[in-house]
Image (cartoon, grey):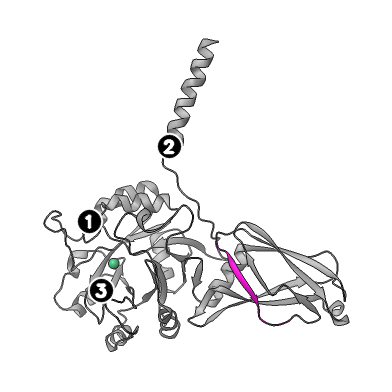
Amino acid sequence: MKIRFLLIFIYFICSLSFTYGQSRKIIYIPDIPGYKTLKCDFHMHTVFSDGTVWPTVRVNEAWRDGLDAISITDHIEYRPHSKDIVSDHNRSYEIAEPLADNLNILLIKGAEITRSMPPGHLNCLFIKNANLLERENVMDAIREARDQGAFILWNHPGWKAQQPDTTLWWDQHTELLNKDLLHGIEVFNEKEYYPEAIDWAVGKKLTMFSNSDVHSPVSMLYDTDNSTRPLTLVFSRSRTKGGIREALFSRRTAAFFNNTLAGPAELLEALFFASVKLNNPQGPLKNGETKYITIENNSDIEYQLELVQPGIGFDVTENTVLRAHRVTALELRGNSEQVASNGELKIYYKVNNALVSSDANLIITLRISNN
Ligand code: ZN
């Protein structure tokens, strides 16, 4: 008996050490037809520029927070720790890469060109040699990044330090756009939101991003246990760096932060319908009768719905929230004889936390079989 208790005790001690091991969060944001939905953050710093953490910490954080891909984008022109950290611009990537490979985090090689406005701060993703971006003339630096095959995005376009009064699009950005030197823009950065950026992304065909731009440990900036840090959702053909690059250049992203999505309508619509399962009521709805349909939301995104126009022959719940990992019931009530003759009931909702422009929301149509 004593041996048995000893074995149980040893087993208990061993399982404790597993319990206190690292664990990775699972983010429930579904794939959409034809594409994997990758959870990414393409803007962060380490001690190799003005951050306060070692590069491998960024990889550990990404793994723990459930991310698929990150880019460490240390500043080229701003390195306040350079007396203590003496190295070239490729070092943060080189240090982080073996751990990223080990933990299956896709580490995209990046750097941030850091200039006054215009053009401001630009992230260059998929570069090959960050040292070559150290150029006196900003256009030379950006051209060098592009020649290395980089995807280039404008960071925090409405950052108050650089755009104190209004968020402006400058002539130099038009020049960059015309010369194929600008491909994307941040809609969300750290905890800020730039509505203008959505309209520029739509009008000028730029890819939308939501990035943390974190300098401290992530846990000092966000409560990632109870919410998600800013995520750029990339709709990629494969979970590979090449897949991400193709998706970014094809503008297949959505920006997600603070339970708000911004992106192209067709992608947000696909994401909404991949997130929910609609259950039809039994039998057709008749005049004066009440029936319920249920919507199961299997994603981490809470969808806020507002009715756009009345149903034909029926009333339906006007405002509702599809809470994450819950089933929500919608009440349908027939209000004319017309309802029974409709084989399909269409309900049009505006999704208040899904933005397709600075002042327009995604509209979805729920189609209810009424036979
Ligand atoms: Zn930055």
Question: Can you identify the residue that label 1 sits on?
Answer: 47
Q: Residue at x 36, y 46 (%)?
A: 102
Q: Earlier in the sequence, mark 2 or mark 3?
A: 2
* Residue 316 appears in the rendering: yes
User: Residue 230 sits in which quadrant?
Assistant: bottom left
**Residue that label 3 marks:** 147
Amino acid marked by disc 3: Asp
Query: Height in image: 6 above or below 238?
Result: above
Identify which residue, 310 or 146, lies in the foreground: 310
Measure the alpha-carbon separation of dots 2 and 3: 46 Å
Q: How far apart are marks 3 and 1 (CA)?
A: 27 Å
* Mark 2 element type: loop
Ligand 1 within 8 Å of disc 1? The answer is: no
- Considering every residue shown, the one lying at the far left of the view is 83
Q: Residue at x 41, y 61 (%)?
A: 40
Q: Which is nearer the eye, 252 or 291?
A: 291
Q: Is mark 2 within 8 Å of ligand 1?
A: no
Q: Which mark is residue 213?
A: none
Left/right placement of residue 97 relative to residue 187 reads left
List x then y, in percent, for residue 161.
27, 76
Labels 3 & 1 near each other (Cβ < 8 A): no
Label 1: state its secondary structure. Answer: loop
| Dot 3: element | helix
Amino acid type of the residue that numbered disc 2 sits on in the rendered structure: Tyr
Residue 65 location (% of width, % of height): 43, 53
Residue at x-position 18% and y-position 65%? 131
Going by the numbered disc 1, the residue's amino acid type is Val
Residue topped by disc 2: 20
